[in-house]
Image (cartoon, rainbow, N blue to C red):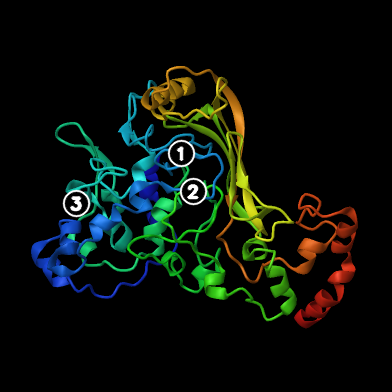
Amino acid sequence: MKRYLIVLSLLVVAGTAAQAKEHSGKEYIEKNGYQGPSTCESQGCHPGTAKKFLGTVHWKHSSMVDNVDNVEPGKEYGMKNRIYTMCNGNDLVNNLKEIPPNPKTGKTKFTGCNTCHPGNHISDVGSTGKDAENAIDCLVCHSPAYDYRLRKPYKDEVGRVVMGQDRSVKAAIAVGKPGIKNCMVCHEAAGGGVLLKRGFSFTKETDVHAAKKMVCVDCHGAKDHRIPTGYDPNNWANDGVRVACADCHGEAPHKEEDNNRHAVRVACQTCHIPRTGGALAKDFTKWTQGSDGFYEPTTLRMEANETAPVYAWYNRTVANTPAFIGPKGGRADKESRIYPFKLYEGKAFFDRKTGRLLSMDFAPPMATGDTLAGVASAAKTLGIREYDPVPGWQTIYFGSNHLVTKEKALSCANCHALNGVLNFRALGYSEEEIRKLTSAGIYFDKMAAKQKEEW
């Protein structure tokens, strides 16, 4: 949905690309041009890298999952095949395609959940072999000079839909460590719109790490293109490597021991990410027609830093049912900590016969608004012959891991005042414990002293 247009619009995304040192292959590229991964591997520079990349989540869009309930043993999951109500589709049913002409305008356009896949679409998600290796778009991640106007779909001479790439000498000789824009050109556009799914923008105004001129890969540093991720309940696919605040800050990051004591059961994000944003609800059963004549799922959204999180115990394992995807854990579980989450609700069609969420091919409803035609098309692709579609809601907890602040971090009173942000009752505390935890006596002297210092 509007993915290729979003990619172009994200040229204005704030954030400075990492400064690249002059590439050792500059002279060779200037003389011979750039032909993709084969050029990167020539001269003995990056041998075998393309083949290794084909085994990563960024190429496969799936992986084995070991911390989620109700998944099939031995089966990989990810954007390739998952169905949930932020997207209500996947690469299988919403592969990059040209949608039917819009009856109002007669126009059509290209769309697909795999628009951000770093291939050429002819070699697509999960493909292997030499053609797949040669199709990898190295520069979309590694060049600050990449021209995103060239990364758009088109039809070749035999009618195949191809995702274009910038393989210019200018882009190739600028390669280096991925900058913020290289990552965010796809990750900000996830979920069908800019800042929609995660609801955060990584800029110096919104995140303390960006203010220190850090880039995404300073925390998400890859080894053999395997990118470390956190434990977002909704982000299942991973490369088997993880990243956490403690990797840089340690388990006792504060000067005050009282704060370090809290950190044992309270995640860093809880105090240091007090706001989130993005879509808070979508309705895939009712699409809204835009001024261009095309339709989009009806969406309620908030700006970054506008929405207060929901707090819950989380032990990094995930409850997964058709109606709910979210954190597992509890106060009695010593592996659990209190984390902040963005709460999201999605309405879509479920199968009355099985209770399972039905996928939707976006091509029919984008053109005509006919949502059930989208369900039927997806069912045909997935080999589902019998189903009884009925509207229903799914609740999803998205991990809140960016928009980190130090100056606006939660204070003692933010959590422990009578009207504080934490719902101690929902977190499993007794009425007597709540009375103690929300008494001004436990934080008054400390905050009064701090207030005096600020005056």
Q: Secondary structure at mark 1?
A: loop
For badge 3, the amino acid type reads Asn
Q: Would residue 106 be found to the left or right of residue 276 on screen?
A: left
Which residue is rendered at x = 29% and y = 52% of the image? 54
Q: Secondary structure at mark 3?
A: helix
Which residue is rendered at x = 57% and y = 61% of the image? 403
The answer for how far apart the CA atoms under marks 2 and 3 are is 28 Å
396 is higher (above) or lower (below) than 374: below
The reply to whether residue 136 is in sight is yes
**Residue mark closest to the camera, 2 vs 3:** 2
Asked whether disc 1 touches disc 2, contact meaning CB atoms under 8 Å apart, the reply is yes
In the picture as drawn, the residue positioned furthest to the left comes out as: 31
Q: Would residue 260 be found to the left or right of residue 442 on screen?
A: left
Q: Does label 1 or label 3 sit earlier along the sequence?
A: 1
Q: Does label 2 or label 3 sit earlier along the sequence?
A: 3
Which residue is rendered at x = 72% and y = 69% of the image? 262
1 is higher (above) or lower (below) than 200: above
Find residue 156 and report its image quarter: top left
Mark 1, Cα crowd under 10 Å, few <14 / some 14-19 / many 20+, is some
User: What residue is pinned by disc 2?
Assistant: 236
Q: Nearer the viewer, residue 151 or 268?
A: 268
Q: Nearer the viewer, residue 299 or 440?
A: 440
User: What residue is pinned by disc 1?
Assistant: 82
Which residue is rendered at x = 32% and y = 37% of the image? 96
